[in-house]
Amino acid sequence: MKAVIIYSRGKAWLNGKPHWEQKLVPHRHYLVDTLKDRLVSAGPFMDHTGGLVIVEVESIQEAEEVAKNDPAVLEEKFEYVVHPWEPLEGLFTKRK
């Protein structure tokens, strides 16, 4: 199944600073290293309010575990919500 993790600004977000000044490199490395070939797509919102991750997981609980252990969440730079997601047919191919 696919899940979407939506990140939004947390308590430790530096107001007035764009996402590239938030010291989010550990967040990016964590997602790439943890999700490896299960990461479908990810990126920041260009209005600097958070970001979105689309991931292939076995269960919604797996996506919750990824999100809650994200360094940016642990540092309170981000808050998150996780949703199961079904793309429109034909837009994303199923990973093998």
Image (tube, helix red, strand yellow):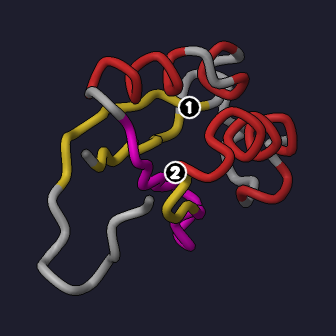
Q: Could you tell me what secondary structure mostly forms the magenta stretch?
A: strand
Say which residue appears at 59% left-offset and 63% top-offset: 43
From which residue to which does the magenta span run? 43-57
Above or below: residue 46 compared with residue 20: below
Say which residue appears at 56% left-offset and 31% top-offset: 78
Q: Per the image, is 50 magenta? A: yes
Above or below: residue 18 compared with residue 30: below
Q: Which residue is mark 1?
A: 78
Three-letter code for the amino acid on which mark 1 is drawn: Phe
- On the image, the x and y values in percent for residue 56 come to 40, 47
- Image-based side of 24 in relation to 31, left or right: right
Residue contact at pointers 1 and 2, CB within 8 angstroms: yes
Say which residue appears at 33% left-offset and 48% top-offset: 4
Packing grade of label 2 (10 A; few <14, some 14-19, many >=20) is many
Camera-side residue of 29 and 52: 29
- For this orientation, the residue located farthest to the front is 96
Circle 2 SS class: strand
The quarter in which the N terminus is drawn is: top left
Q: Earlier in the sequence, mark 1 or mark 2?
A: 2
Above or below: residue 19 compared with residue 94: above
Task: Tell me where residue 18 sits by quadrant.
Answer: bottom right
Three-letter code for the amino acid on which mark 2 is drawn: Gly
- On the image, the x and y values in percent for residue 10 come to 54, 28
Q: Per the image, is 78 magenta? A: no
Above or below: residue 65 compared with residue 15: above
